[in-house]
Image (cartoon, rainbow, N blue to C red):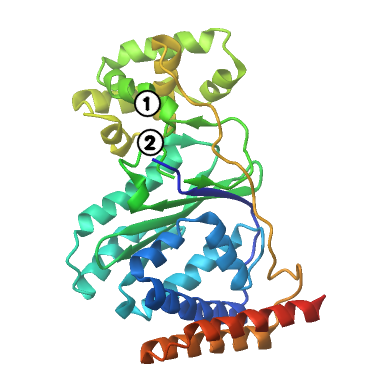
Amino acid sequence: MKRTGTATLPLHGGRAPAWLFVRMKALAGEVIEYMVSELGAPETLSRFSDPRWFQALGCLLGFDWHSSGLTTTTCGAVKEALRERPYLGLFAAGGKGAASRRTPQEIEEWVERAGLDVSPRELIRASRLAARVDNNALQDGYQVYHHLFLFTSKGEWAVVQQGMNADTAMARRYHWVSSRAGDMIEEPHAAICSQSSGLTMDLTARKSRSSREIMPLLAAERPDKSLAQLLRMRELKLPRRHSLFLRDIDPRYVRKALLEIYERPPSDFVDLLERPGVGAKTIRALALIAELVHGTELSWVDPAVYSFAHGGKDGYPYPVDREAYDASVEIMAEAVRRARLGQGEKRDALRRLHRHLLSKETDSR
């Protein structure tokens, strides 16, 4: 399986001004409607799994070129635009903070409201497992706080979610799409696009397969045996990376989680990952025991590769031109109207949009 993508962006405070968000929503709606008419809902959905395409969309909508706000605000605009266009067969649930916790409820509501012949339970499971993988199986120092779940009327899905690292004041974006996610635990994400965060324990790497296979077996052993190994490891002089990962693991809390698992042993790594109460520290403890005691391989390579640079809201490379923005929305709206009428002039409309944006960029220099 190939990864779908990760992006790392600096954390910025504040929110998009109302005048900008209204325009972002309008332009996002016209762009997505045009794409669905031209490419279909499944292919449009898959574009959200490409971090470079998503970054370009955020820049097109006029938001910060490199900040964490690009993710949350672009997703918000897309969600609001899709809310008004259920006829496209593309739906959005979730969002930032409390909105992310409403994802299961919103999935069920859309399935019922739109009369979709898909299983909301399967979609909800995919949503939850994607969050658990990026929080617990890929331990890169980022806590997921934003989760947008997109799905089609046929049940294809994509995830755009973002994690926060308060220590470095950076955010990392994770992209998923059902057609590439496989079993969701081995390299489920494809072109990794972000700056490296240094020390990372990647249980989703192909190299970590042996660790994933033995961890459910360790969890099924008597908790005191695993805890004895964990305490012994804490007393040994270990390589720096292991010492760092062991430092904040409290055996008392791990014991409580292991006791609950022991009473109903997990069948595999996915089952272990999905268990309520099994968080990042329990997963980390079992992974370290598997590697140091049982000799299984474990990847310590951050999958991040490179970051983005474009333009936007904060005045770089130039301030948002409201008049030009409104003209862009109207040009896209006209393209969509012509697509609905089947007049075959969509490409001409896009060429006009391209020339329009180029002229504004030239004028601003």
Q: Nearer the viewer, residue 102 or 259?
A: 102
Residue at left 36%, top 21%? 210
Q: How many marks?
A: 2
Q: Nearer the viewer, residue 261 or 292?
A: 292
Q: Which mark is residue 5?
A: none
Label 1 Cα crowd, 10 Å radius (few <14 / some 14-19 / many 20+): some
Residue 257: quadrant of the picture: top left
Position of the N terminus, as image quadrant, is: top left
| Mark 1 in CB contact with mark 2 (< 8 angstroms) | yes
Q: Is residue 89 positioned above or below 13 on the image? A: below
Q: Is residue 285 positioned above or below 32 on the image? A: above
Q: Is residue 305 visible?
A: yes
What's the residue type where badge 1 is placed? Arg
Q: Is residue 294 positioned above or below 75 on the image? A: above
Q: Position of residue 193 (x, y in %)?
A: 58, 48
* Residue at numbered disc 1: 209
What's the residue type where badge 2 is placed? Glu
Q: Is residue 51 positioned above or below 361 on the image? A: above
Position of the C terminus, as image quadrant, is: bottom right
The residues tagged by marks 1 and 2 sit, at their Cα atoms, a distance apart of 8 Å
* Residue at numbered disc 2: 186
Left or right of 203 in this view: 9 = right
Sequence-wise, which precedes: disc 1 or disc 2?
2
Q: Position of residue 258 (x, y in %)?
A: 31, 24
Element carrying mark 1: helix
Q: Is residue 91 visible?
A: no
Q: Position of residue 250 (x, y in %)?
A: 46, 23
Residue 329: quadrant of the picture: bottom right
Left or right of 98 in this view: 303 = right
Q: Nearer the viewer, residue 36 or 259?
A: 36
